[in-house]
C-alpha cells in the first residue's frame, strides 16, 4: 500500500523448497519497501490442510520478518474478514470477490489478485496503517 492510496495486489507463486519460498517472499517485500510504501497487509494462510502448515506459515513468518527488518507496518488478516469487507458475507466465492473488485476498481482481476486487492483495501479502509 502506498501513500497515494494505490496498492500493488499481486498473487505470486513461489516454487521449490521452503527455503527458496521464504527467501522469495523476503526479497519481494524488500523490493517494494520504498519510502512511499505505508504497510503490508498479508492474507492469513488457511490452516485446514497440512500443506498450509508446511509451506504457507513459514512464508507468513518470512513476510513478517521482512516487514520488521524494513521498518514497515504489517497486518495479517483472516480471509473471512476480507470476504465480508468485499461482499458483506464471510463465505463469498472467488467470482464474487472478483465482481466486487471490478465494481470498486473498474478492472478485471484474477481470483488471487482480487483477494490480494481486498487485503490492501481492508487495511486502508480500516485505517490499519494510519
Image: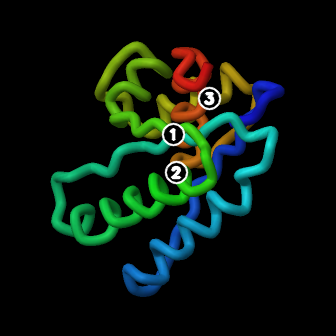
N-terminal label among 1 and 2: 2
* Residue 114 seen: no
Q: Nearer the viewer, mark 1 or mark 2?
A: 2
Spatial CA span between label 1 and label 2: 8 Å
Q: Give me the residue at 73% from left, 40% from top.
A: 37
**Label placed on residue 101:** 3
Q: Residues within 10 Å of mark 2 (few under 14, many from 20)?
A: few
Spatial CA span between label 3 and label 1: 22 Å
Q: Nearer the viewer, residue 71 or 42?
A: 71
Side of 4 relative to 7 (left or right)? right
N-terminal label among 2 and 3: 2
How far from the left and from the top, in percent, is residue 94? 45, 39
Q: Give me the residue at 62% from left, 37% from top.
A: 39
How far from the left and from the top, in percent, is residue 21? 47, 75
What residue is shown with label 1?
Answer: 74
Q: Nearer the viewer, mark 3 or mark 1?
A: 1
Q: What kind of element bears circle 2? A: helix
* Residue 125 seen: yes
Q: What kind of element bears circle 3? A: helix
Q: What kind of element bears circle 1? A: strand
How far from the left and from the top, in percent, is residue 121? 59, 26
Residue 56, quarter of picture: bottom left
94 vs 89: above or below: below
How far from the left and from the top, in percent, is residue 52? 26, 62
Side of 22 relative to 81 (left or right)? right
**Label placed on residue 63:** none
What residue is shown with label 2?
Answer: 68
Amino acid at each position: 500500500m502506498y501513500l497515494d492510496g494505490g496498492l500493488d495486489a499481486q498473487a505470486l507463486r513461489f516454487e521449490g523448497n521452503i527455503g527458496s519460498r521464504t527467501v522469495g517472499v523476503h526479497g519481494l517485500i524488500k523490493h517494494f519497501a520504498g519510502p512511499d510504501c505505508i504497510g503490508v497487509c498479508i492474507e492469513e494462510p488457511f490452516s485446514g490442510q497440512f500443506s498450509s502448515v508446511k509451506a504457507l506459515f513459514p512464508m507468513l513468518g518470512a513476510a513478517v520478518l521482512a516487514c520488521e527488518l524494513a521498518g514497515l507496518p504489517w497486518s495479517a488478516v483472516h480471509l473471512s474478514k476480507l470476504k465480508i469487507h468485499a461482499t458483506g458475507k464471510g463465505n463469498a466465492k472467488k467470482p464474487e470477490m472478483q465482481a466486487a473488485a471490478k465494481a470498486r476498481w473498474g478492472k478485471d482481476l484474477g481470483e488471487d489478485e482480487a483477494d490480494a486487492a481486498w487485503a490492501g483495501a481492508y487495511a486502508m479502509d480500516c485505517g490499519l496503517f494510519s
